Image: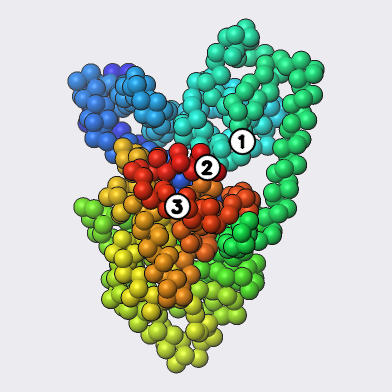
Amino acid sequence: GKVSDTRKEREKLRRAIEAAKAELSRDEMTLRQSLGKEEAEIFRAQTLVLEDPELLEASEKASGDGHENAAVAWHRSYQAAAAAYQGLSDEYLRRRAADIQDIGHRVLEALGIQRRQVPHLPQPGILVADDLTPAEAAGLSRDSVLGVICLQGGRTSHAAILLRARGIPAIAKAKPVFDREGVSPVNGTTTAAFDGESGKLWLNPSAEELHQLRVQKEARELETARVARLSHEPATTTDGKTVKVLANLGHPAEAADALNSGAEGVGLFRTEFLFLNRNDVPDEEEQFAILRALKEPMDQRPVVIRTLDIGGDKLVPALNLPSEANPFLGIRAIRLCLERRELLRTHLRAILRAAHGGNFRIMFPMITDPHELREATAELEGVHAALVREKKTHAWPIPLGIMIEVPSAAILIEQLARSVDFFSIGTNDLTQYMLAADRGNPGLAQFHDSLHPAVLRLISTITSSAHEQGRPVGICGEAASDPIAASLFIGLGVDELSLAPGLIPKIKESIRRIARKDMKALAAEAQELATGADVRALIGRKL
Ligand code: PEP
Ligand code: MG
């Protein structure tokens, strides 16, 4: 409807955008814990769209010139942006139209307009949709939706990535099959079957076909069950190298699931979840209680507690962090902790006390050079001394490690190795810093590949320098859960992998199929190539 007070409408829209952003960051956090980083990044990238000044300007213009109310003006401008993406020739960019729709819906909802609802299936069945937005894919009930057929969409769509990660089979671009078979995709009941791997779809299959498909389904379920059973066995390559496979956790409640999936411990406990989504800072007792909860389920298995990794894109309102022009190159993680010594001390006290009687280790994130490591270690020793004076039970000595995420640290391994017991490579950050490509910028997708030859070469120098000093090297970035990347990392000498718990059985199974010596040869070949995509093509051909 037309309005006269356009300023009020503009204000309303800005508030709705802020509300949508807050909701997005909550969803991102939940997803990061339940599925993993890559999936969560989808929602982070959406936040960037909301920050696009053009979109806001277009709606403000509509509301100013046309006297449109906030919802109408917003609807018009995001639809236009989505249509612009839809018209692009690049398949990847075209898929981003669904993200714009998603964001558009969120803001409309914040303006009081209900978003499209995925209908509830009366009994478990296959959902047929034109296309799904990422938020819809993340919210589907796994109990009632056995699979998803998208008439449009594509494998690279964010909805497809989310469905895959959640274990819901899906196929895309199914419209031609419906047309050919003369079946209407809307209303009515149709028997359908599809193979999410090959993308093949059967509409109204014959009794014979249906029987065949059921047999195939059972065989696949048996295979999944076999892999799940084997997940409790070690992952040893065909030539006898056993690689430790651990879990990345963000909350102690995930520990039981991780053990069920075959995790041999926790390779990365992301403590920042203790601090996000709240308006105060947790005190020592609260931190202690949460960390302590890891001890019982993990028993004597190793548990690596990473000290606070906030700043950058992870904001904690209660800390009043000053805004920075380049947050990823700013005061984040250990840098922030060294600026806020009280925060670090409280945190380290909680960790050392919780570690008593368990097999905990401490890991500092984002270490840049030996001086910074010395500063952090001095704090740790100071906290130990204080706890001794206070006669408080705590673990000491405690194994100490650092994350290798900054290229300078990767180059200084030899010096750093003298002061630590282990290294863990954070390929998410190491890749972004190595290739100077912000990990949240979707326009730089070609560089967000931890299999880029430059990253492989760096990892190779990290493992060889660390091994010369007798220090083990793990990988805890997202790439550790990708079977192709994991195989190459093993070829590069990596000793441990730490990943989202749900993907552990699959990674263990893929390790058992390779010989380390073959991977070593492949890794050498890969380092001669030009891009991450070239490396993937090479490994795809050979594996
Ligand atoms: C990494 O950077 O690879 C990592 C594991 O740390 P985070 O993703 O939490 O920054
Ligand atoms: Mg990191």
In the rendered view, tell whether residue 435 sits above or below residue 74: below
Q: Looking at this rendering, what residue extends furthest in the top direction?
A: 182
Q: Earlier in the sequence, mark 2 or mark 1?
A: 1
| CA neighbours of label 3 inside 10 A, class few (<14), some (14 to 19), many (20+) | many
Looking at the rendering, which quadrant does residue 328 occupy? bottom left
Mark 3 against mark 1, which lies toward the viewer?
A: 3
Q: Is mark 3 within 8 Å of ligand 1?
A: no
Dot 1 corresponds to which residue? 168
Q: Specify the label residue 542 is tagged with.
A: 2
Q: What element carries label 3?
A: helix
In the rendered view, tell whether residue 428 sits above or below residue 100: below
Dots 2, 1 in contact, CB < 8 A:
no
Please give the name of the residue rendered at 39% of the width and 30% of the height, measured from the top-left corner: 92
Split into 4 quadrants, where in the image is the N terminus?
top left
Q: How far apart are marks 2 and 1 (CA)?
A: 29 Å
- Residues 302 and 276: in front is 302
**Colour treatment of the image:** rainbow
Q: Specify the label residue 523 is tagged with.
A: 3
- Residues 269 and 65: in front is 269
In the rendered view, tell whether residue 482 sits above or below residue 344: above
Split into 4 quadrants, where in the image is the C terminus?
top right
Looking at the rendering, which quadrant does residue 318 occupy? bottom left
Please give the name of the residue rendered at 36% of the width and 56% of the height, measured from the top-left corner: 457
Please give the name of the residue rendered at 31% of the width and 25% of the height, measured from the top-left corner: 81
Please give the name of the residue rendered at 73% of the width and 46% of the height, measured from the top-left corner: 225
